[in-house]
């Protein structure tokens, strides 16, 4: 049977998106969709109010160019290369040109939605600062998408260069050219935009010459592995992912704060799992710090309440999979606690974690005043009680059905 690069790419892409769909149906459930819609509505409401406060001196074109330039410079290429390919596909490298061209264009199609959303989000700010309407939206969109294609081709060629320093330099150069090009486009200085395009073509030619060598199969497989691992870590916040193996750290200095074995087998196990596994303790720290910063900097009670409730929900919901973390171990089952004891242990863990968050959020809300802090704290504690004693049992019953 004759080898077909197109058939191989279709097979790899189909398998990849089947894997993505398998986990996203658990991630984007009704509860998360409600939270996201609620959060998006709140963001858009306050964003529209903030736009009314800016004037023509606001540097909207440069802010848009910097943000979009950074997103464009990121531009990973989805090659779907696996570790065995470094052996079995190596003799067929000369026949894989069509495969990697499809990889670049598929990456373009998959990542363009983010650029369209960002540009659409920024256009009201641009229109208010520039004193214009939205007639330039499609011109801007065409420029951004053209820059995306250029970034993807440069990125793929840079992956075949000899050193990591060259790949880092490629990202830095592309970021600067992206910002220069988009700033000129948003300012409607098309002569300067043309100059940036010329420099971009010269850089593409240069990076193609540097990367005109045999493919770095190990590097491509490594990047694909890291990309999938990042997705699995995200999915693991919502459901158990067998592919993921979390890293563990002892953290003996926290042992004094944890319940001992006399409190129950599952209590002892789950508390130490939370503290010692980086995926759980890291999740808690990240969400707590982000929410505390938002609450502190906003100073507005509605935003403080929305942020506190949203991040409490996200923390609690994403910690629920810890309940099934040790489901395949036989040793905890030797003790007569059963599923009820396991559920009580999880509820105790969630209660302590979310109460700590509630106190942190209440302290952060002091930026708005003592009354605001008291309201945020009391509402957060009330939500914690609801989440632990009403929402969690129902959610666990639903998880047991899968």
Image (tube, rainbow, N blue to C red):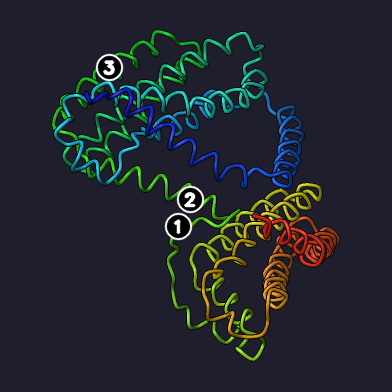
Q: Residues within 10 Å of mark 3 (few under 14, many from 20)?
A: few
**Which residue lies most toward the bottom here?**
262
At a point 78% along the width and 55% down the height, the residue shown is 368
Q: Is residue 70 left or right of residue 158?
A: right
Q: Is 67 in front, or is 102?
A: 102
Q: Are marks 1 and 2 in contact (CB under 8 Å)?
A: yes
Which secondary structure lies at badge 3? Answer: helix
> Looking at the image, is mark 1 or mark 3 earlier in the sequence?
3
Residue 201: numbered disc: 3
82 vs 366, left or right, is: left
Residue 312 locus on image (x, y percent): 71, 58
The quadrant where residue 394 appears: bottom right
Q: Is residue 277 above or below residue 128?
A: below
Residue at the spot x=58%, y=13% of the render?
Answer: 137
SS class of the residue under badge 2?
A: helix
The residue under label 2 is 232
- The residue where tag 1 is placed is 244
> What whole-number distance in Å separates the C-alpha atoms at marks 1 and 3?
41 Å
286 w.r.t. 2: above or below:
below
Count neighbours of disc 1 (C-alpha within 10 A) and say few if under 14, some if 14 to 19, many if 20 or more.
some
Q: Tell me if label 3 and label 2 are in contact, CB under 8 Å.
A: no
């Amino acid at each position: 049977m004759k080898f077909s690069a197109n058939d191989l790419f279709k097979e790899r892409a189909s398998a990849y998106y089947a894997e993505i769909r398998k986990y996203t149906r658990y991630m984007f459930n009704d509860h998360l969709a409600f939270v996201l819609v609620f959060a998006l509505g709140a963001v858009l409401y306050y964003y529209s109010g903030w736009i009314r406060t800016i004037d023509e001196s606001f540097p909207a074109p440069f802010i848009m160019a910097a943000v979009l330039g950074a997103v464009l410079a990121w531009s990973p290429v989805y090659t779907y290369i696996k570790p065995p390919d470094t052996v079995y596909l190596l003799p067929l490298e000369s026949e894989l040109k069509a495969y990697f061209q499809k990889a670049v264009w598929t990456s373009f199609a998959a990542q363009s939605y983010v650029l369209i959303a960002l540009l659409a989000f920024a256009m009201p700010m641009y229109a208010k600062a520039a004193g214009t309407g939205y007639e330039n939206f499609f011109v801007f969109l065409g420029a951004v998408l053209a820059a995306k294609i250029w970034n993807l081709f440069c990125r793929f060629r840079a992956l075949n260069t000899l050193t990591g320093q060259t790949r880092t330099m490629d990202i830095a150069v592309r970021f600067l050219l992206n910002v220069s090009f988009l700033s000129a486009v948003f300012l409607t200085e098309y002569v300067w935009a043309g100059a940036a395009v010329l420099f971009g073509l010269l850089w593409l030619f240069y990076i193609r010459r540097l990367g005109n060598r045999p493919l770095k199969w190990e590097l491509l497989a490594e990047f694909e592995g890291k990309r999938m691992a990042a997705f699995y870590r995200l999915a693991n916040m919502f459901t158990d992912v067998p592919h993921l193996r979390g890293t563990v750290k002892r953290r003996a200095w926290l042992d004094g704060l944890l319940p001992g074995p006399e409190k129950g087998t599952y209590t002892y196990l789950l508390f130490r799992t939370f503290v010692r596994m980086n995926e759980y303790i890291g999740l808690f720290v990240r969400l707590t710090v982000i929410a505390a910063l938002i609450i502190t900097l906003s100073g507005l009670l509605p935003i403080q309440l929305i942020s506190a409730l949203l991040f409490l929900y996200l923390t609690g919901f994403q910690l629920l999979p810890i309940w099934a973390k040790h489901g395949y171990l036989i040793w905890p089952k030797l003790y007569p606690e059963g599923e009820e004891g396991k559920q009580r242990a999880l509820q105790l863990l969630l209660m302590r974690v979310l109460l700590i968050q509630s106190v942190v959020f209440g302290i952060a809300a002091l930026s708005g005043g003592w009354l605001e802090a008291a309201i945020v704290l009391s509402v957060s504690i009330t939500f914690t009680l609801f989440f632990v004693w009403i929402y969690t049992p129902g959610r666990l019953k639903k998880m047991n059905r899968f």
